[in-house]
Image (cartoon, rainbow, N blue to C red):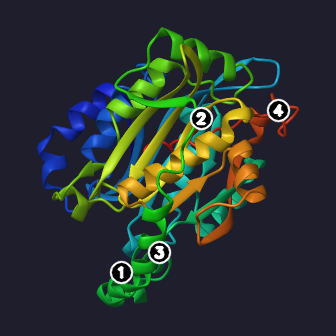
Amino acid sequence: MEITTYNAVQLGDFIRSEEFRTMPVIPISTPRAISHIHNPRAEPNDVLLIIAREGGRMVGYLGVLPDKIYNEKGEAFRCGWLSCMWVDPEVRGKGIAKKLIGTAFDTWSDHILVTEFTPEAKGLYDRSGHFNALRTNDGLRCYLRFNLHEVLPKKNERYKKFKRLLSMADALANVPINVRLNGLSPLCDSTLRFESVDSIGAAIGTLIGAYSSSGFERRSSDELEWIRRYPWLTTGTGEEAKKYHFSVNAERFENLFIKIMDGTQLRGFMHLALRDNHLKVPYAYLPDDILPDVLAYIYDLMIRTQASMLTVFHPAIVRHLQQHKSPFIYKRRIQRNYIITKTLDAHFADHVSLQIQDGDADCAFT
């Protein structure tokens, strides 16, 4: 078995190669690769992709997203987030996943983190003996409209054949809900102004820096611009979606930068992501006293864009949603788990105080 690693230059050459163009299964989509290459936290020799081959045929791959994290003392540590691991079903059981992860450990000096993993992957990580639990973030998934035709097929493959029927049922059930929502809008009626901006200026950058001073990743304005400029998803359809086992396309995908003004005073900033009918809040920098207006703006945005779901892990927003009435027909508690290698965890004494935003790791990209 041959294990090959790719840094930014090598990854760029690979996605332009004849091999990549003719592969029946690809180890990374072109948008993801381009985003990795432009990652402002990546260094020239960082390993971004690991491929396992047998007899020249790819049998597995693992992506790594370079990053920098900060402990409670403000000390910075370079690290990689594992992302998108796949092993060919025909050769599973031969230890390929273990070799891919072992290569990631070696090339990243055991400074590895993972989130949004499957139960199968979690078992593999546990058996490696390398990881500790870092954090479990509590969140909410809130439903503004019935959305069974999108939710159920993702939970169980057998529902895919009923997707059209489920869509018709959703449309029928949503008729009275849409009438009610249209009667409620607009819900945001305050002195605050919510303005969509094309870029992050100096004032917003200063605000982000102030709120990020005790953050886990401490994203800068340039890094948020990178996330918006180089998303992992494209709209429409394409051949790569048939060859890649993770998300490539969406019917709709928008990154929205929203600044919040009170007269001439900047009060807050949000990065919102709208994928199809699903709204997320990757990054929010705002004081608690404006939360009622922020949520009213989010409700109005969802009504205007026909979004059905909101997913959020931001602690203050989650608490407000739990403690106050909202237009949502249903709110479900969810969790996001983070694990960290023991070598890296040795530098962190206090997991509870870490401010982990919804978009940290690779979560802002999809």
User: Residue 290: horizontal and vertical position, in percent?
Assistant: 67, 34
Q: Provide the residue designation for mark 1.
A: 171
**Which of the two discs, 2 and 4, sits closer to the camera?**
2
Q: CA distance from mark 2 to mark 3?
A: 28 Å
Q: Provide the residue designation for mark 3.
A: 177
**SS type, badge 1:** helix
Q: CA distance from mark 3 to mark 1?
A: 10 Å
Report the residue at 19% width, 56% height from top.
Answer: 236
**Which of the two discs, 2 and 3, sits closer to the camera?**
3
Q: Residues within 10 Å of mark 1 (few under 14, many from 20)?
A: some
Choose top left, top right, bottom left or bottom right for residue 174.
bottom left
Report the residue at 74% width, 57% height from top.
Answer: 324
Tell me which amino acid carries mark 3: Ile
User: Residue 29: horizontal and vertical position, in percent?
Assistant: 28, 48
Tell me which amino acid carries mark 4: Ala
Q: CA distance from mark 4 to mark 3?
A: 51 Å
Q: Provide the residue designation for mark 4.
A: 346
**Which of the two discs, 3 and 1, sits closer to the camera?**
3
Q: Residue extending furthest right?
A: 349
Q: Earlier in the sequence, mark 2 or mark 3?
A: 3
Q: Earlier in the sequence, mark 2 or mark 1?
A: 1
**Which of the two discs, 4 and 3, sits closer to the camera?**
3
Q: CA distance from mark 2 to mark 4?
A: 29 Å
| Contact, mark 2 vs mark 3 (Cβ under 8 Å) | no
Residue 203 versus residue 138 in the image, above or below: above
| Contact, mark 2 vs mark 4 (Cβ under 8 Å) | no
Q: CA distance from mark 2 to mark 1?
A: 32 Å
Q: Provide the residue designation for mark 2.
A: 284
Choose between 183 and 218: the one closer to the eye.
Answer: 183
Whether residue 47 is visible, yes or no, is no
